[in-house]
Image: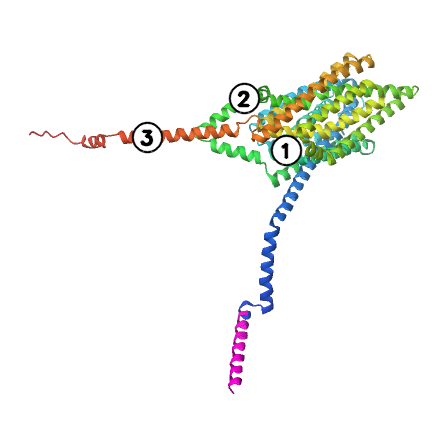
Amino acid sequence: MTSFSGGSDKMKEIDSEKASWKRMEMNAGLSTEDFASSRAWRYLNDKLSESFSVSRIGIDMQIDELTRVLWLSSTLFFIVGGYWLLRSLKDPIMSAIDGVEYIPQAKIASLFVVFGLVIVYNKLLDIFPKHQLFYMMGISYGVLFAIMGLLLLHPTIGLKNTVADPYRPLGWISYVTIESFGSMVVQCYWALVNSSVDVNFAKKNFGYIVAGAQIGSILGPTLATQADWLGIATLYLLGSVIMFLMVSAMFLYVRQFGMPQDEKEEEEEKHSRDGGREKKRKEAKSEEGVMEGFNLFYEHDYVKGIFAVSSLYMVQVTVIDYMMKVLAKERYAAMYPADPQQAMRAFAAFMGFFGQTTNSISFLFSLFGTGMVIKRCGLTNTLIAFPVLMLVCTVLVWLHPDIWTVFAVMMVVKGMSYALNNPTKEILYQMTSTSIKFKCKSWIDTFGQRCSKAAGSIITNSFASSIVDLTNYGSLVGVAIAAFLIWVSAYMGKQFEQLSAAGEKVGEASPQLVAQLQLLREQALRQQNLDVREEEALDTSCSVEEEGQAQSDHPPVSVRV
């Protein structure tokens, strides 16, 4: 009985425990198995989160970087694609409306127009945020191209009027507008990019961004070849649509990633609003005006180096390009002596093939080679590589001045200038202030290459009567420029690495100087507080003056002892 009683007590204890678990299940709304599995799942999930949190962050960073590259590349795709589409139309439009003989005058006129626009642009940089200025430029060009596209359909103003007259303004306006677009919008885009990314991103991804531009440079002229089917006015209106797509792409990029440099400037302005200093700062900034870019260029050798890397090679490119066109024209004129029209079409096909191969090489190298070369060779060696390539190509042209050697040299030089020199040149701007990125860059990119092309044209005009003299003297100038650029590139690479290591930017106060100024400011403030406390400690009036002033309201009382 005893054993049975003990067993009965044990069964009661088990039933009681089961009832307790049952009440827990009812209160929780879960079965025992669900409750246990839920706890196990939470534990496993916590452990997995701890183990893979870094991996998840790494994946997010990669996706964020890829998204940034895609937005920037698509914006540049619209810029370059739209420019090449319209660039292919400007000469035919000018020839049909005003006459082909007025194209050189239109080029000169565009130089003055661009000069005025750069002055206005530098002034507006002090008024509007940089990305809003980009929107304004894009929308303005989009509206202008839309209006001119519609005017091209007009029976007397547009292309239907086949009588060329230099006093018809539409051809001139079309020519200088397209020329100014290529000068203004591209440099503003790169200034925005340089102000919104860091140097590591630039070294790794600028090649991919340029690849998007090269796709545009291939598709733009390809669309222009359909002018017989679509019509020039329709293509012009398509160029207007591309302007608005360009603005939309940049707007969405800024909306997603913001403009860190602009936010930094706004924060600095908020901190500087103390005792009228903000007003004085704005007054001083307005006094600098459009000359600030020139002043910064004059003050900093680093900026002069960027100018040399960006522009001087165009002197030799202009000479070799002219040689190629002269040799090609002579070749096809000799092939079709009795049919000038066929010779002209063959020459045009030759130039079209040149454009396709050049842009294709640039696209492939931008996509697969630019980032790899910069990563493996370093920025300094990459900078030096382009003028070394120019030197080798110049020697090859001097040794073998035939059509296909010059064609191959121009194809390589042009392709590498887009895919190698342009990205490294933009990376150099990473170590400069915002003013240099926008104000100096606008002058360098607008007039640097134009002046270099003008210098190259002086050489070609001087020796245009003899291809032999042009080859000899042009090659001599090219060797001198390439040797100089090798030295400049080595200097710029060294300066870039030093600035990057020190965390300094040209045109801005160094972190050490800022820290010293802050320390001096704090010391002056502490000394001022100390002087005030010392004056209070030395004051022995014990508020007698105040008491005397308080008693002065009552008549004095005489006291005799």
Work out how far the residue at label 3 is from the one at label 1, CA to CA, in angstroms: 50 Å
Label 3 belongs to which residue? 532
The x, y position of residue 298, in whole percent, is 59, 19
Of circles 2 and 1, which is in front?
1
Up-down: is 65 above or below 320? below
Of labels 3 and 1, earlier in sequence is 1
The type of residue carrying mark 3 is: Val
The x, y position of residue 57, in whole percent, is 61, 46
Of circles 3 and 1, which is in front?
3
Work out how far the residue at label 3 is from the one at label 2, CA to CA, in angstroms: 40 Å
Label 1 belongs to which residue? 193
Task: Point out the stretch of residues depicted in magenta.
Answer: 1-24
- Crowding at dot 3, Cα within 10 Å, few <14 / some 14-19 / many 20+, comes out as few
In depth, the one of 102 and 365 nearer the eye is 365
User: Mark 3 and 1 residues: CB-CB less than 8 Å, in contact?
Assistant: no
Label 2 belongs to which residue? 288
Of labels 3 and 2, earlier in sequence is 2
User: Residue lying furthest left in this view?
Assistant: 561
Residue 26 is left or right of residue 386, and the answer is: left
